[in-house]
Amino acid sequence: MVGFLSDELLSTIHARASRHDAENTFPDDDLADLRDAGYLAAFVPREFGGAGLTLEEIAAEQTRLAKAAPGTALGINMHQIIVGLGRHLVRNGNPRGELVLRDAAAGELFGFGISEPGNDLVLFGSTTAAVPDGQGGYSFTGTKIFTSLAPVWTRLMTFGRDDSGEDGPHSVFAVLHREDGGFTVKDDWDTLGMRATQSNTTLLQGAHAPEAQILTRTEPGPSKDPVVFGIFSNFEILLAATYTGVGERAVELAAEQVRTRKSVKNQTVYANDPDIRWRIADAALAMNAVGPQIRELARDIEAGVDRGPIWMPQLSAAKNAAAEASLRAVEQAVRACGGSSYYTRNELSRLYRDVLAGLFQPSDQESLHSAWANVVLGPVER
């Protein structure tokens, strides 16, 4: 398939990546170029004003973009996740998804305000208070962390816990508009890697969403609710695709560098050293196993396949497979290329730091193994 993003654009974005990492700055220039290229609406169906890319196709674009600039790719990935949610809602008869799609087609940029400090429930329960306004809307008060695109989002997907009903607590998912205020963005993104995402902490201070911006009110926990599953499925697939780009780029860099790095002992380039060849082959093998999982899951989501209760564990497994394979690929590439990769001027140095972020993003290994233990063994007997 011919890529949606041109090779020339990706080359331009790649040339900026080291600067944004070194300066710990948001890549405004990358965003402007991606917007001009139509990428904010690439995943929007044609009937809503977008380019109509499928989930498999947008995943492939995310991999290509991550090979050029992981931080830029991870940031814009959050926007694409919410667009994917909008598509999922429309397909499942929830007209609120149309609001997401039309906003994305109009150039609005979606941020992702879900994660909270110390909350390992992540999508399945919130510590943020969601207080009803009596007219179907809600005000949200709480702390959201890892809010990618924090300096520039115009729409923020978030959720909170509504304790007002007699039927027990409920999770309320809503889209906030930046111009409505009610929040503070902290300047606290000083991290090891993925610095260009500028995923600053966001303090919700009574941020209000009227009834028209409420997507669902549902019981906490793993759920068949289209909002919960729509976020979860697009998040795991597109996150996997993005980290795949980091791993694939590491293999490319290693192959390039060992073709010119010469061994004094062997009087030939390291590309001829059997041990180095094994390392790079090992990295390539790790990455080779990831792509088919992503593509199969993406196709099944597009086709509306019902995998039943195994869906979420399998989605989590694909994300973890991509994150772990990419981590291994980068490490093998660093080992193959030797001490030069320890210098910050070497792109592998940045990839090594960037790839570590995949360890912290849901679903983590603890959650993954717990879910699969339940699949294989059933719940713990009490």
Image (tube, rainbow, N blue to C red):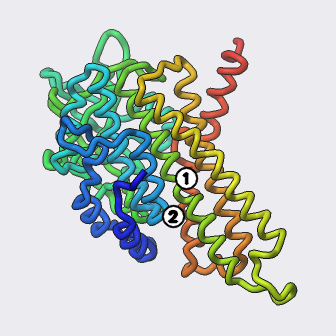
- Can residue 129 be seen from the camera position used here? no
Which residue is depicted at the point 47% across and 35% down? 298
Q: Which residue is mark 1?
A: 244
Under circle 2, the secondary element is loop
Residue occupying the far right of the picture = 265
Q: Position of residue 360 (x, y in %)?
A: 55, 48
* Left or right of 342 on screen, residue 206: left
Residue occupying the far front of the picture = 1
Q: Position of residue 19 (x, y in %)?
A: 41, 77
Between disc 1 and disc 2, the foreground one is: 1
Q: Position of residue 20 (x, y in %)?
A: 40, 72
Mark 1 Cα shell of 10 Å, populated few (<14), some (14-19), many (≥20): many
Mark 2 Cα shell of 10 Å, populated few (<14), some (14-19), many (≥20): many
* Left or right of 230 on screen, residue 372: right
Which is more toward the observer, 206 or 253? 253
Which residue is depicted at the point 31% across and 21% down? 92
Under circle 1, the secondary element is helix
Q: Amino acid at mark 2?
A: Gly
Which residue is depicted at the point 71% across and 83% down? 261
Is residue 249 positioned above or below 341 on the image?
A: above
Q: Which residue is mark 2?
A: 193
N-term mark: 1 or 2: 2
Which residue is depicted at the point 61% across and 45% down? 290
Quadrant in which the C terminus is drawn? top right
Q: Amino acid at mark 1?
A: Thr
